[in-house]
Amino acid sequence: MWQQQRVSVIFPTYNERDSLYAACRDAWECGFVDEVIVVDNNAAPGSADEARRGGARVVRETVQGYGSAIQRGLAEATGDLLIVSEPDGTFSAHDFLKLLSYSDDFDVVYGSRTVLQLIWGGANMGWFLRIGNMAVAKYTELLFNTSQLSDVGCTLRLLRRSSYEQMRPYFTVKGSHFGPQMMAMSFLHGFRVIQIPVNYRRRVGESSVTGSTTKAIGVGLRMIALVSGLRLRGRRRVPVPARHEWAVELKGRSNEEAAVSAGSR
């Protein structure tokens, strides 16, 4: 709980079985988290068991892709403040406090992994990835004339529920470049947005994206095309996808859960 607001943490998982338990326990131990959701996105066998052992609620998303997993996790979350992170050991739950502190004044808080003093030894943030993320971030900053940006690919971020609900109908990206779509939508909606430096540590295991230079370049190019297109079209022309069946089901379920929760207080 933070300032009388429930806090949900969302972890997507595909190839993080060996670090899931520790990530879930760290989230609980930061002292402000009310709910940890792990989205099993066709993850390695045993991943769900590790997540439950760490006290998380596991939900399954069969449509493969980072964007699909995050959208499912956000739809399932019940908190007022929604923290999106990675369970691969790269982020520290200690930085959740930074995000929460800034949430008092901002609608969306994005993390940045490009501050040299906070990049740990062995972290997968060499000069190529660092400069690439900074370049696309500055391009995005210029396009949307927004607050200072230094990292377009950081997946540690916080959203107020009210902001998420406004952006949700415009989320269309299922893959690795979902993060920049969320970022662009927050600018187009005129939210109070800030990006802050966070710790970036060595990953447990190998990433399916940044572990390959070719894949990383491909994701970067898709990010550039995405933010350029959104800037040209504006949010009113962004296609609104058909709602998932589970999203409709969750909407009805959330009303029932809210009533039960209110009665239990």
Image (cartoon, helix red, strand yellow):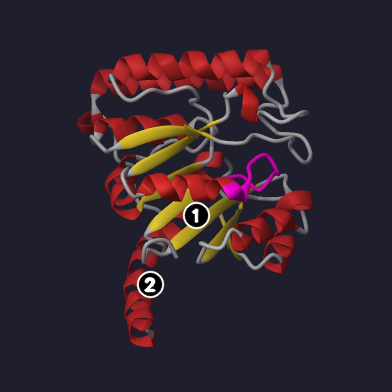
**Residue 111 position within the rendered picture, expressed as x and y whole percent measured from the top left:** 50, 35
Mark 2 or 1 closer to N-term?
1
**Quarter holding residue 252:** bottom left
Classed neighbour count for the residue bearing mark 2: other residues with Cα under 10 Å, few (<14), some (14–19), many (≥20): few
Amino acid of disc 2: Arg
Task: State the residue lying farthest toward the left.
Answer: 236
Numbered disc in front, either 2 or 1: 1
Q: Which residue is drawn at 30% across and 47% down?
A: 163
Amino acid of disc 1: Gly
Query: Compared to 51, does 213 lie above or below?
Result: above
Question: Can residue 159 be seen?
Answer: yes
Query: Compared to 20, does 118 lie above or below?
Result: above
The residue identified by callout 1 is 73
- The rendered magenta stretch, by its main secondary structure, is classed as loop
Report the side of 238 relative to 47 (left or right): left
Quadrant where the image shows the C terminus: bottom left
The residue identified by callout 2 is 253
48 in the magenta segment: no
Report the side of 73 relative to 20 (left or right): left
Q: Residue at x 71, y 31 (%)?
A: 120
Residue 48 badge: none
**Of helix, strand and loop, which one carries label 2?**
helix
**Residue 185 position within the rendered picture, expressed as x and y whole percent measured from the top left:** 32, 34
Q: Which residue is drawn at 70% across and 33% down?
A: 208
Decide which of 108, 53 is in the foreground and name it. 108
The part of the chain drawn in magenta is: 84-94
Classed neighbour count for the residue bearing mark 1: other residues with Cα under 10 Å, few (<14), some (14–19), many (≥20): many
**Residue 116 position within the rendered picture, expressed as x and y whole percent measured from the top left:** 62, 22
**Of helix, strand and loop, which one carries label 1?**
helix
87 in the magenta segment: yes
